[in-house]
Amino acid sequence: MKRHFYLVCGWLSLALGAIGAFLPLLPTVPFVILAAFCFARSSPRLEACLVNHATFGPHITAWREKGAISRKGKVAASVMFAASIVLALLFAPWPWMMVPVVVAAVTGTWIWTRPEA
């Protein structure tokens, strides 16, 4: 039963990561790292696919070994935060326009305080 729970969570995380590739405020790599965590507890084959993936594998390994995020990842996150803030300021009413600002401030600070891969 627990194995099935982790398998479903892994697939949901992977789906959110895929969606995040197209939406500015939804990140991709953290969801792929979460998927690898879930697959490690449910499907070693799927975990191996992610860990050995040319794009995501190095991010998963760096996070597992050092809790590290690459400089490129930090910059990409910051650019996406900026895009989300601009879109919110242009199109969202008050006070909703402040949501991306707060999320960017809190999450961006956390991201930039992680070690670099």
Image: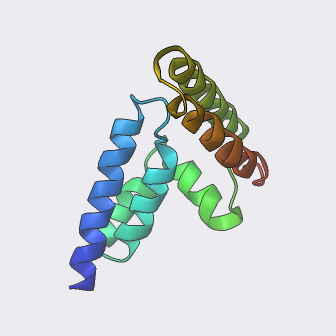
Q: Is residue 102 above or below residue 43?
A: above
Residue at 20% in and 85% down = 1
Residue at 34% in and 37% down = 19
Look at the image and tell me whether residue 52 can be seen.
Answer: no
- Residue 108, percent from left and from top: 69, 42
- Residue 26, percent from left and from top: 46, 39
Name the one closer to the observer, 20 or 66. 20
Look at the image and tell me whether residue 69 can be seen.
Answer: yes
**Left or right: residue 106 compared with residue 17:** right
Residue at 39% in and 72% down = 40
Name the one closer to the observer, 113 or 54. 113
**Left or right: residue 13 compared with residue 72:** left
- Residue 51, percent from left and from top: 46, 57
- Residue 31, percent from left and from top: 44, 52
Q: Quadrant of residue 50?
A: bottom left
What colour scheme governs how the chains and residues are painted in the rendered image of this protein? rainbow
Q: Is residue 3 above or below residue 34?
A: below
Q: Is residue 5 above or below residue 67?
A: below
Q: Is residue 66 above or below residue 20?
A: below
**Left or right: residue 89 compared with residue 14:** right
